Image (tube, grey):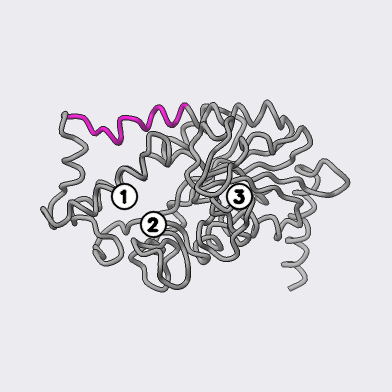
Amino acid sequence: MRTVFTAAAATIVLLASTLTAQAGVLNYVALGDSYTSGPLIPQQRSDPLGCGRSKSNYPAIVAARLGAQYTDVSCAGAATAQMAYAQPTVSGTNAAQFKALETFTDLVTVGIGGNDFDLFRKVIDACPLLRASDSTGNPCERRFSKSGTDSIKAVIPTISQRVKDVLAGIHVRSPKAKVYAIGYPRILPPSGYCPIQLPFADGDYAWLNSVEEALNAAIADAVKADGNSSYVDLYGPSLGHDACAGNAAWINGKDDSRSPAAAAYHPFLAGMEGMANVVYQQVTRP
């Protein structure tokens, strides 16, 4: 047992020596969209309320484990543009997220990209409505490929470039910070269906998985091109925790009125805890 505690202590000491800039206090800034902010997860913050920012999201959990001083400016609906520009919400305006960055910032996590070109919204709005027309086929994939080109996947390379630009913007403002780009956790199972929770046509499950995989690959590519950041994969570690996984689910299905509370198609508190475990392990990796 002493060996375990010694190893853990050594890890924290190493983290402090490599990340901390001010008298042993780690300065952590969390940027991102709703998969970072945690809409409807208790306890919601009011700065502004429209961001759906929970005091129990993964940045809060990671910050507590690190003993860090943290600033969370993530906001539901944020796209890469909201890093540099203010974001109006249904209740209040979120300042440009880059404003939270300081020259003394030690650690930055950023989870962004899924709202660019309204990518997530388009598929969530359209796909459930099309199941009735062809429940075993792939009507949503066909809808977005009428021109012969998959219009959803076609924008993903541009999202990758935008994420790369975001990473560059972070480095300019916080040149000493360790920067981690956070991928998206798995929403759908790799096989099987659960139309009550995820009311998509059976044939669209594989396509929707391929869209999320392409988005995560684009974020990883942005990190590689940036050359001075790290990618945190949540898709792999969330296997078995998709919205069809019952009590093991990290992600909610279509119903945002169930208990425990979480926005539709967004992480539960259990999801935030699972995501926090992955992020923490990578941030503290020697």
Mark 1 lies on residue: 124
- Residue 158 in the magenta stretch? The answer is yes
Rendered location of residue 142, percent (x, y): 16, 41
Q: Earlier in the sequence, mark 2 or mark 3?
A: 3
Question: Mark 3 is on which residue type?
Answer: Pro
Number of numbered discs overlaid on the protein picture:
3
Q: In this view of the protein, which residue sits in the foreground, 84 or 168? A: 84
Dot 1 crowding, Cα within 10 Å, few <14, some 14–19, many 20+: some
Residue 281 shows which numbered tag? none
Q: In this view of the protein, which residue sits in the foreground, 159 or 230? A: 159
Dot 2 crowding, Cα within 10 Å, few <14, some 14–19, many 20+: many
Residue at far right of view: 23
Which residue is depicted at the point 69% across and 55% down? Answer: 63
In the figure, 56 relative to 140: above or below? below
How far apart marks 2 and 3 lie (CA) works out to 22 Å
Q: Magenta residues, as a range?
A: 148-161
Mark 2 lies on residue: 265
Check contact, mark 1 vs mark 2: CB within 8 A: yes
